[in-house]
Amino acid sequence: MEVSEGFSVSRRLINYITTYKTHNMKKLSVYLILIMALPMCSYAQLGPTVTSWILNTTGATGYGGILSNVQQVQYGTNNVYVSCTCIPGYSIGPWTGNPNIPSNQNFVFKITRNPTPNTGALTAVSLGQIGVWKNGVTMYNALDAQSYNNQGVWLQNAYHFELVSFDNCLGHPDQSGQYHHHVSPTCLYDQTDSMHHSPLIGYAFDGYPVYGAYAYSNTNGTGAIKRMASSFQLRNITDRTTLPNGTTASSAGPAIGTQYPLGSYIQDYVFVQGSGDLDSNNGRFCITPEYPQGTYAYFVTIDASLKPVYPYILGGHYYGVVQAGNTSGGMGNPGGHNTISETVTTYTTGVATVPSKLSTLVYPNPAGDYLFIYIQPIASNNFTARLVDMTGRIVSTMENVQPTISYTLDVSKVPSGVYNLVLQNSDITHSEKIVVSH
């Protein structure tokens, strides 16, 4: 039962109560309790994949005046679609020695509502985004995309080589302007709270939740709260000539010392089964507050002094099956711009809404070389934007325009004049007059 169904039942109960002549106040109280409980039950049944995101309902802005946190959450039977700028609500920066500047990424991430374990060869976590925090900021793996002498053998640990460029929230932007965290996002949740189970703070791209550092001691949801310990350990080596599997490296790494201490490279670590609480993916199957029936879950790892511990978020692989569309094609070529291909409902802080009237921001008008298009939140997707002249000729087209995402239409080569901007999908056609003036 979804929220709309709950409210429908509630109305029927209200009608029944107002027409039924009863002196039995106990029965009336039961009906009133049902009225209040139904929407709450419906809300819960949507599940944390829908309800856990930090929605920006006030138009609040973050770095650079960009809208912060998550702009819209839409859900269908199979997936949740999270529209976000990749800018958090907390203050970020500066980034020592990092010339990059955070920018609006206009992401539409697709998170499955039905995650499944991967029974075949596990999918390696790639460079670029590997998941999304609940505020719409991306999570990255432990690598910084560089290796010793560019030989691809000894891979650099981002926490060691890029720490100087992290801000107070332990995040920084890459060259594409994507602000991200390689390690536990200190400003997103209270990582000093060791008395309570940590909150759900994001989802990996296989659809399984990512939690903060603390959980129940026992996987069945019992026992004291404890800090989850990684099962990766620093190797007992004096030089970098062998790999974690014991084979000889094709090329030696740098000497272990002050400049490159043990832990500077990913190959300085080895997975030791049972040495910690978590598996090689940095997760475990367990009961959590949001998943009382149990789920596989990842945990960010930190030490007693709150410093990040390798592998920080996910290990080298995803536990579950990863859908296409979210992961990066490499640095500077991010994924996360999904087309919505199923019927969806818009989720707004516990209430599902299905508005049908299109509201837009189209500016400037008159336009010079560029026209900026923004569709307000609505549960209708995949619009085509067409600029049509007064004779009916289409002079410019843009496909897969999604609500809550800012788009730029280049009209620098369009002759000056009056045009109609037509936004259309299978449900809605919207048109407004645009003047182009060079």
Image (spheres, rainbow, N blue to C red):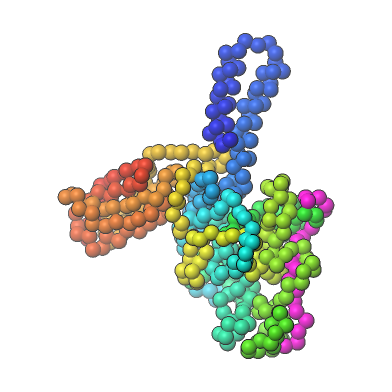
Q: As rendered, which of 12 and 138 lies closer to the eye?
A: 12
Is residue 60 in view from this perspective? no
Q: Is residue 2 above or below residue 169?
A: above
Q: As rendered, which of 347 and 359 lies closer to the eye?
A: 347
Instruction: Check the picture and name the quadrant holding the N terminus.
Output: top right
Which residue does the image show at 33% across and 47% down from the upper left? Answer: 424
In the shown orientation, is residue 188 left or right of residue 345? right
User: Which is the main secondary structure of the residues drawn in magenta?
Assistant: loop
Residue 197 at what x, y percent from top left? 74, 52
Residue 342 at what x, y percent from top left? 46, 47
The image quarter in which residue 184 lies: bottom right
Range of magenta residues: 220-239
Residue 392 at what x, y percent from top left? 19, 49
The image quarter in which residue 204 lies: bottom right
In the shown orientation, is residue 422 left or right of residue 161? left
Residue 110 at what x, y percent from top left? 52, 54
The extreme front residue here reads 120
